[in-house]
Image (cartoon, helix red, strand yellow):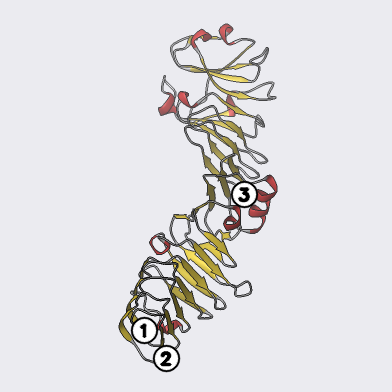
Amino acid sequence: IGTGSTFVDLQSTAAATSIQGGDGNDTVYFEGAGTATSIQTGANSDQIYFFNASAWNTGITIDGGSGFDTLYLYPSNATLDLRSATLTNLESINLNGSNLTALIDADALTGITNLSGNSSGNNKFVTADATLDLSGKSVSAVTIESSNVTGTTFTVSNSTSAFQVLGGSGSDTIQTSNFAFTATQRDAIFNGSSIELIHDTSGFYGDETANTITGTAAADNIQGGGGADRITGAAGLDSLSGGAGGDTFVFNFPSEGMDTISDFVPLSDSLEISAAGFGSGLVAGSSATLITASDVSLASHAGSIGYFIFVDQGTNAGTVYWDATGGSGTDAIALVKLQGVASLASSDFHLV
């Protein structure tokens, strides 16, 4: 093409094996059905336009070079697969058609900082990936959607981009690493985007369906929302809330306490205990042994099989303890505090 600002227009069925740009602001048009194998636009801010879906070569190599370079896709009522293309040194992808779908994965978005469309085009980027990192990317006037049947975890670094994300048929998550949504923002996302789980810097939040939520090794805040949720706090001193529905709170090892559950409802919610993880003679499918006492030191159970203690009085009222050695409860460790719970039954435990 040369060193100046140059315009190349491929019309009708005209095709090119390679288009080489120079140091100027290059513009390349694909107005017809002709394709190209390779485009390298060189320095400065370059623009590449595809107006016809037939011109898109799924195996094309595009190197934008230095500068801020944009790929414009204008076809309407079409699906373009960007996953097999090699896109490097591009900073922006714009969907400017109508009912245009661009299939993407993590590789297709490498180096991209801007994903945009037109406000009336109903255009979307669709991923089948289990995870898609949108950190550092601006998303506007276009949606980012999941086609993964089990769900996609989208990582975002700003709330504006988060509101452009739509889940699919699976269990989809929006995750942030540098900010927290307001309660109003969370509700808006849950009500309008088929997102089932939000994980931001303030905690984990589920929507009104049945969710499976697993925390980290830190002290997590986990709120299940509606539905029969399955919540694992994991390590750390976690604050847990199941919300409406019969929820299951999972403890795989004694070391995962001491958590606090703010809304445990006996005979509705349950404490799931891993027999293998706790050991001490517990058997999956059997009933847990539960002793209620006014103080943990007053509890006792004959034999060496592990058992649970529920304290119903004093400052530790509502606390469940685990005694791995049987006998006196003086060596029991705190497992979970059930706020506002006055009594507990062995049927509230589920050994698996």
N-terminal-most mark, 1 or 2:
2
**Residue 129 appears in which quarter of the rendering?**
bottom left
Front residue of this view, candidates 212 and 182 = 182
Front residue of this view, candidates 246 and 207 = 207
Determine whether 300 is above or below 287 in the image: above
| Residue 151 visible, this angle | no
Q: Please give the label number shown on residue 35.
A: 1
| Residue 269 visible, this angle | yes
- Residue 338 place in picture, x, y as percent: 63, 25
Give me the C-alpha separation between circle 2 and circle 3.
52 Å
The amino acid beneath tag 3 is Thr
Determine whether 65 is above or below 335 in the image: below
Q: Residue at x 48, y 27 (%)?
A: 256
Q: Is the Cβ of the residue at disc 2 closer than 8 Å to that at disc 3?
A: no
Front residue of this view, candidates 35 and 334 = 35
Q: Sort mark 1 into few (<14), some (14-19) or many (20+) by Cα contacts within 10 Å.
A: many
N-terminal-most mark, 2 or 3:
2
* Element type at mark 1: loop
Residue holding disc 3: 209
The amino acid beneath tag 1 is Thr
Numbered circles on residues, count: 3
Q: Is the Cβ of the residue at disc 1 closer than 8 Å to that at disc 3?
A: no
Q: Quadrant of the N terminus?
A: bottom left
Q: Please give the label number shown on residue 11.
A: 2
